[in-house]
Image (cartoon, rainbow, N blue to C red):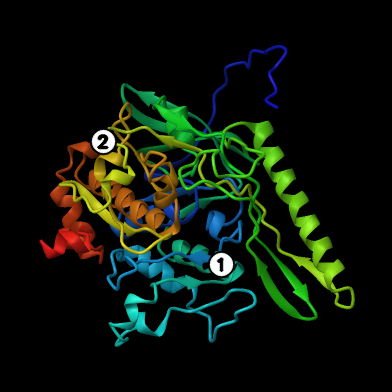
């Protein structure tokens, strides 16, 4: 139940220090934020990444959602490259062999160099990783590339001059301070920066209980992908309540408590079924496990009708992790804020409606849009403009291609379109 304050107080005005000044500020350290920060830093601009927890990876690591979903279309064609592929390979770089019970699985042989092309049609290009190893690997990668990290830091407000964000006000153990920036990427997963900056957003109250966790049984580690049924269209029909919204403090807490109650029930059931074994709970999720919470409503919201559609401002591609066939192109318009000229959104808070949100929120889409947003932000800084829309999309596309991104119109076409 949403709690309403019975009274209000007036917080006195105060001077707050500007503790960091950077070219590109990335808010959120999930896969989208990691990709954005890495892409921008590699282009030679200064980057600061603000993360409310004390680790990178978001749901992939702290939420134990340990499947690097496919970079292919399910019919043998790779459609996502660049940082999406680099970060997938990093996730299993230290995996010497597969471990089925905990769900650690390397890249299928057919998708490795020299692999069987025909076998790719029946085996998707994915991996299943150790979240603890991946957490450390992501952190090491960003530090090695010169990204300044601010952990345990929450965004509180934005300061603007006309339509440009000049500072992000944050709070952490040092108190309240500000980060000055030229460009900013919202990779919070919940469109927190877009909301604070006055952009139009859409919020959903259809999230269900969910909590992936591990158990240890007689020395063997097992992954349990526990979730209530959810709707691919972010609706309540076809899903199992209770339902929660991700932009309300009380409901976030209720979702966490309810999900942990399910974990307790599952552990009790495992112990009851096998009383002779010592079943121990290992590594429950340490962040709320929401799928779709709040997103930017941009100039264009990607939808299911856009499957197999090429846009002139395409900056990345992704397949549909749920089924073979569909390929989605990401238009730059869906990453650009409307009110604020120097704000971009990446990952699950980009502009996509409920018919495509379940695709765009997945790890490949987060990596692809993160790289696109970080690249565009860096290019804007290097060209001395504070408006990402002022960049010719051909410049962004050329740079992304040079980084290994797959941006070919033919990859978006369906089998029927290719036969025409």
The residue under the point 59% across, 74% down is 103
Residue 354, given in percent of the width and then of the height, sits at 42, 40
Other-residue count near label 1 (Cα within 10 Å), few / some / many at <14 / 14–19 / ≥20:
some
Classify residue 299 as left or right of residue 239: left
Which residue position holds label 2? 386
The residue under the point 81% across, 69% down is 280
Relative to 354, residue 412 above or below: below
Label 2 or label 1, whichever lies nearer to me, is 1
State the residue in front, 142 or 129: 129
Residue 311, given in percent of the width and then of the height, sits at 18, 47
Quadrant of the rendered structure where residue 177 is? top right
The residue under the point 43% across, 59% down is 322
Residue 366, given in percent of the width and then of the height, sits at 41, 53
Classify residue 351 as left or right of residue 309: right
Label of residue 136 in the image: 1
Quadrant of the rendered structure where residue 256 is? top right
Name the element at disc 1: helix
The residue under the point 56% across, 48% down is 230
- Which numbered disc flags the more N-terminal residue, 2 or 1? 1
State the residue in front, 329 or 345: 329
Relative to 109, residue 360 above or below: above
Name the element at disc 2: loop
Locate the N terminus by quadrant. Answer: top right
């Amino acid at each position: 139940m949403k709690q309403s304050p019975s009274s209000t107080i007036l917080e006195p005005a105060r001077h707050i220090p500007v503790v960091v000044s950077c070219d590109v500020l990335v808010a959120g350290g999930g896969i989208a934020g990691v990709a954005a920060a890495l892409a921008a830093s590699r282009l030679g601009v200064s980057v600061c990444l603000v993360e409310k927890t004390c680790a990178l990876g978001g749901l992939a690591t702290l939420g134990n959602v340990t499947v690097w979903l496919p970079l292919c279309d399910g019919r043998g064609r790779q459609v996502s490259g660049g940082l999406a592929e680099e970060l997938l390979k990093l996730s299993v770089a230290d995996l010497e062999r597969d471990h089925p019970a905990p769900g650690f699985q390397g890249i299928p042989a057919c998708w490795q160099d020299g692999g069987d092309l025909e076998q790719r049609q029946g085996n998707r290009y994915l991996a299943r990783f150790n979240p603890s190893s991946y957490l450390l690997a992501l952190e090491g990668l960003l530090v090695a590339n010169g990204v300044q990290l601010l952990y345990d830091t929450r965004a509180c407000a934005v300061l603007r001059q006309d339509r440009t964000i000049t500072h992000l006000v944050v709070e952490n153990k040092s108190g309240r301070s500000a980060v000055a920036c030229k460009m900013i990427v919202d990779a919070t997963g919940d469109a927190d920066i877009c909301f604070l900056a006055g952009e139009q957003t859409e919020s959903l109250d259809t999230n269900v209980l969910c909590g992936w966790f591990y158990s240890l049984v007689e020395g063997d580690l097992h992954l349990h992908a526990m979730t209530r049924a959810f709707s691919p269209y972010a609706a309540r029909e076809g899903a199992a309540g209770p339902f929660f919204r991700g932009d309300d403090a009380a409901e976030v807490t209720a979702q966490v408590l309810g999900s942990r109650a399910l974990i307790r029930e599952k552990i009790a059931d495992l112990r009851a079924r096998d009383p002779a074994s010592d079943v121990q709970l290992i590594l429950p999720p340490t962040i709320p496990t929401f799928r779709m919470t709040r997103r930017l409503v941009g100039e264009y919201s990607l939808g299911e009708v856009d499957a197999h559609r090429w846009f002139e401002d395409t900056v990345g591609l992704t397949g549909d992790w749920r089924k073979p066939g569909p390929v989605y192109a990401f238009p730059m318009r869906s990453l650009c804020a409307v009110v604020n000229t120097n704000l971009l959104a990446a990952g699950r808070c980009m502009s996509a409606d409920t018919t495509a949100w379940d695709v765009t929120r997945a790890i490949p889409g987060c990596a692809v849009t993160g790289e696109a947003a970080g690249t565009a932000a860096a290019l804007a800084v290097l060209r001395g403009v504070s408006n990402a829309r002022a960049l010719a999309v051909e410049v962004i596309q050329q740079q992304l291609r040079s980084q290994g991104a797959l941006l070919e119109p033919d990859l978006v076409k369906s089998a029927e379109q290719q036969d025409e």
